[in-house]
Image: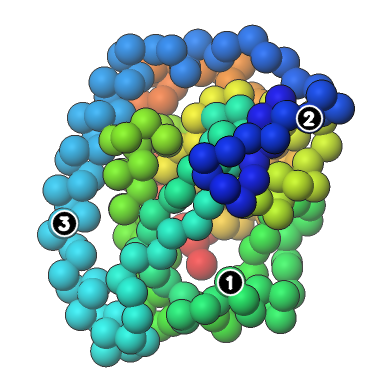
Amino acid sequence: MSICTSDPKSFVVDDSVSMNHSIHASTVSTVKRLIDIFGAIIGLMVTAVVAIPVAIANKIDNPGPIFYSQIRCGLNGKPFRMWKFRSMIVGADKLKHLVKNEAKGHIFKCMHDPRITRVGKFLRRTSLDEFPQFWNVLIGDMSLVGTRPPTLDEVSQYEPHHWQRLRVKPGITGVWQANGRSSINDFETIVNMDIDYQRKWSIIYDLSLIVKTVWVVFKKSGAY
């Protein structure tokens, strides 16, 4: 089993973690990959257009880098660097311990996180902060649809059954994002939804989740 580490180029093998090593059909689907590439190209075009106003707004509101990156765990626990538009103050990661976690289980959520900037709140409500992840999709670290990519500290606390959710590539969207977004705060619920996605997976199902996500984002429901 590949365990995510802080070094995106390395793996740690731990035989004490049990997981079904069978290859999930979505990870070898040529059609899914082609859809990912096409969607990523369109998404990156939109990203290029919105990057300038986002950079200007961030410069006025909270000067610092326009992009934010973090090492996340992907397919089978493989580490990769995920990109987003910065929505928090510079150095927010170092202040995480000061913010109360309102979620249950191995996931972090806070409805009124004081680290989020004014521009960041808008980016999150509209999901514009996620757009740089289309680069991760293009290079193959992520998919348009999959599981939420967990952080290193989350994975370090995983129990064996939690690893099942990492049998597919992480996605910009997925079942739980399309059915409540940030309003779902129980990690075990997310795990069950991710595993259910794997059972139900098909190209048509992926496309339906993309359409549903667009509708949810348009209504700005469940986002903070």
Compared to 187, does 168 lie above or below? above
Compared to 171, does 196 lie above or below? above
Q: Judging from the image, what secondary structure is the residue with disc 1 in?
A: helix
Across and down, in percent, residue 77 comes to 62, 34
Across and down, in percent, residue 84 comes to 38, 58
Q: Nearer the viewer, residue 217 or 219?
A: 217
| Corner quadrant of residue 21 | top right
Which mark sits nearer the N-terminus, 2 or 3?
2
| Corner quadrant of residue 47 | bottom left
Which disc number belongs to residue 14?
A: 2
Number of numbered discs: 3
Q: Nearer the viewer, residue 6 or 91?
A: 6
Q: Amino acid at mark 2?
A: Asp
Q: Judging from the image, what secondary structure is the residue with disc 3 in?
A: helix
Q: Residues within 10 Å of mark 1 (few under 14, many from 20)?
A: few
Which mark sits nearer the N-terminus, 2 or 1?
2
The quarter in which the N terminus is drawn is: top right
Q: Amino acid at mark 1?
A: Asp
Give me the C-alpha separation between circle 2 and circle 3.
41 Å
Across and down, in percent, residue 211 comes to 34, 36
Give me the C-alpha separation between circle 2 and circle 1.
27 Å
Coloring basis for residues: rainbow
Q: Is residue 178 something one can see in this rendering?
A: no
Q: Label 1, on which residue? A: 93
Q: Label 3, on which residue? A: 48
| Corner quadrant of residue 115 | bottom right
Which mark sits nearer the N-terminus, 1 or 3?
3
Across and down, in percent, residue 68 comes to 41, 64
Q: Is residue 167 something one can see in this rendering?
A: yes
